Image (cartoon, coloured by chain):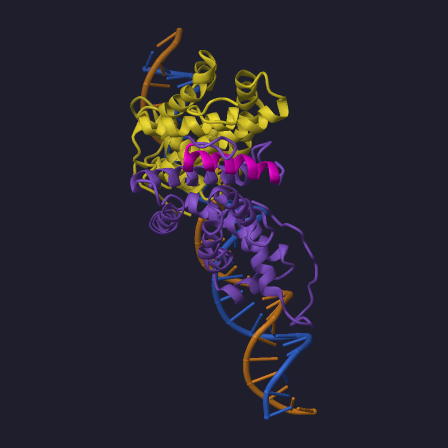
Chain colours: A purple, B yellow, C orange, D blue
Amino acid sequence: MPKSSVPSPRRRLGRRPGAPETQSEIVDAARGLFAAHGYAGTSIRAVATAAGVDPALVHHYFGTKEGLFRAALEVPVDVDSLLNRVLTGERDAAPVRLAETFLDVWDSPETGPAMLAFLRRVLADATATDLVRQFAVATVMKRAAAGLLADVEPADAQARVSMVFSQLLGVVVARRVLRIEPLAGMAREELVQRVSDAVATHLRGVPATCPLT
Amino acid sequence: MPKSSVPSPRRRLGRRPGAPETQSEIVDAARGLFAAHGYAGTSIRAVATAAGVDPALVHHYFGTKEGLFRAALEVPVDVDSLLNRVLTGERDAAPVRLAETFLDVWDSPETGPAMLAFLRRVLADATATDLVRQFAVATVMKRAAAGLLADVEPADAQARVSMVFSQLLGVVVARRVLRIEPLAGMAREELVQRVSDAVATHLRGVPATCPLT
DNA sequence: GTTGGAACTCATCATCCGTTGAGATCGGAC
DNA sequence: GTCCGATCTCAACGGATGATGAGTTCCAAC
């Protein structure tokens, strides 16, 4: 329960001069605080303080705390295009492309915080869990199975892809939610290699560095 | 932010007749609510209502909300003995022992539900996260690294063990929290094999079914 | 210029929160 | 049978929270 964050005492009465980018600043501050402290642990006042703004302005823009939350929760990535990026290209390099794409999304300062806020919501709330389950299973994992393991029996392909999913999920939860070291601070290249080897093991039965059987 | 849960209006003045099991009822109610709504999202009043008790009684027993929380945070398994079970025995079979032990703990009807409640608490609340991080990093993972990878450079060993941790964490979150199929309904043998292969890849660089390099 | 609306703050509301202290009620020791 | 301590409720506190409405300042269209 943070009382305040980074107070930027810019208070003056009425509209500020210059081009207003305040709304997006509020959303950014909300993303950070929601990701760090969860929904209940984040107060509108804390968000307003972090954005250097009066709490009433938050209501002016977003109506309610729930509205602020929804605005902060917009998944900032295009899953389809990311999936295409992974699925097209040399087949053997797919695990590396997957690992790189995945880590990009979660580590980038643009998309990372929103993804984290989204993750926390999904882990904590049953409704969000249902949505993700349907989306993940029905859409993403089916396409991934078809694209990556077209030559494998469908049931086995689904199983392998779901194991890949579990590995990626585990990495992001361990790194960003639990912040387990040395995983959380691991260099990108090393992380890409370790993750892509695990992905390759799940997909093909062997890591990238091991000859195919 | 639940206003109340299951109101059991048992209110009367003073001590109740019969053997008092109220304290454990409060802890049980607290476990459920903390697991469902997180620390900040759970009020002492809601816990008291769910336990059919006055909020002041909660303070009488646990002093503060933090105290209640700590009382509700009890890992229901003996991590030390489980770790010994994994670390002793034939070296090459350690990944399989790890997978089996891990799945036992999470799937057994005795420990499974309590572990799940524990997991949800840890994922949702920063205080529990801190505790687990210190415990996991300082104790469990160091012992595992020393026991499983004594011949490997310590930094690398730590990195490998943390990747194993992420895989196991991902499996349990995908299976029990998100309930992703086919992972959630996968047969135990198949799960043990897939997980232990991934674990072996992280530990030794190759799965169990691939000849050592 | 004037004016209308968007941007922004201030003061304030009712509510819920964690916590406290005093008092009522019961069980068990003597 | 009395009494003491454990168990439990009641009433209330100060503070934080989400929300509201009126008022102030600025930009831009005309």
In magenta stretch: residue A192: yes
Left or right: A2 as drawn, with respect to B174: right
Residue C27, quarter of the rendered image: top left
User: Residue A141 in the image: x percent, y percent?
Assistant: 38, 47
User: Closer to the camera, A8 or A132?
Assistant: A132
Asked if residue B166 lies left or right of residue B24, the reply is right
Predominant secondary structure in magenta? helix
Q: Residue at x 59, y 16 (%)?
A: B151
Q: Which residues are magenta?
A: A189-205
Residue A192 in the image: above or below residue B23? below
Nearest the viewer among B64 and A30 is: A30
What x and y, as percent, mark residue B26? 38, 31
Pinpoint residue B190: horizontal percent, then vertical percent: 33, 29
Q: Is residue B106 visible?
A: no
Q: Is residue A133 left or right of residue A55?
A: left
Tell which of A14 and B3 is nearer to you.
Answer: A14
Name the spot of residue B90 as percent of width and height, x first.
45, 12
Apparent side of residue A5 relative to residue B176 in the rendered image (left or right):
right
Image height check: is B205 above or below A98? above
| Residue B153 vertical position relative to residue A200 in the rendered view, above or below | above
